[in-house]
Image (cartoon, grey):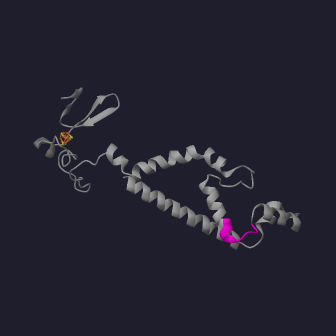
Amino acid sequence: MWIYLVKRTLLAAIIVVIAVTLLYIMILAVPGDPLSVLLGPRSTPEMRDTLRTQMELDKPFYYQIGHYLLNVLQGDLGMDVFSNRPVSTIVFEQLSHTIILILPALAVGLGWVGYLLPTIPGDIPNLVNLPLGCTFSNRCARAFSKCRTMPPRRFEVTPAHFASCHLVTEGGAS
Ligand code: SF4
């Protein structure tokens, strides 16, 4: 289990590095100057140059990406250019929603659901050609001869709780 977790974490880290690098390359490849977008159409070349220096966009590509990845490792994801707030703060604000989505996926992915809902042994009934008696008889550990020939009646055991089993009689389990 731990080896699996370490492998998955390393794989996730490699994927993040590749994704961040590709994203960075794509942003650089887009025509136009992102600083003009940030500063607006009335910005002067001097203003853009000042911001370029402040954001270290005048440095070589490898320096920019290395610097960014180092910051990410320290939990600094940079500033959101629209709200001017730290990206990590924005991410943490939304983390509870992400965790709610991730936990069920993890439960399925790591097989936890298998512990909670173990598979019932036995054959699944043929839905086209259902067995004569109880449709669960192929999988039921308590099946007896009557189960294979006669379908059980449906009883309301307790209010809104129904059961179809020869072992259950009206008013409760026998
Ligand atoms: S009728 Fe009840 S005991 Fe018989 S096979 Fe079905 S579930 Fe099992």
Q: Position of residue 79 (x, y in %)?
A: 71, 54
Q: Ligand 1: which quarter?
A: top left
Instruction: Determine the residue positioned at 78% across, 69% down.
Output: 33
* Bounds of the magenta segment: 57-64
- Given residues 144 and 64, the one toward you in this image is 64
At x 20% / y 47%, what residue is drawn?
139
Q: Position of residue 66 (x, y in %)?
A: 64, 65
Question: Residue 5, located in which quarter of the rendered image?
Answer: bottom left
Quarter of the image with the C terminus is top left
Please provide percent x and percent y for residue 171: 24, 26
Within the magenta stretch, is there residue 121?
A: no
Return the residue nearer the eye: 163 or 55. Answer: 55
What residue is at 18 percent from the left and 49 percent from the top? Answer: 138
| Residue 111 to residue 23: above or below | above
Question: Is residue 15 found left or right of 78 in the rendered image?
Answer: left
Q: Is residue 151 left or right of residue 14?
A: left
Snapshot quadrant of residue 159? top left
Q: What is the number of callouts on the image?
A: 0
Return the residue nearer the eye: 115 or 173.
115
Q: Position of residue 24 (x, y in %)?
A: 65, 67
Residue 60 is covered by the magenta coloring: yes
Q: Is residue 88 above or below residue 54?
A: above
- In the image, is residue 108 above or below residue 64? above
Residue extending furthest toward the left:
145
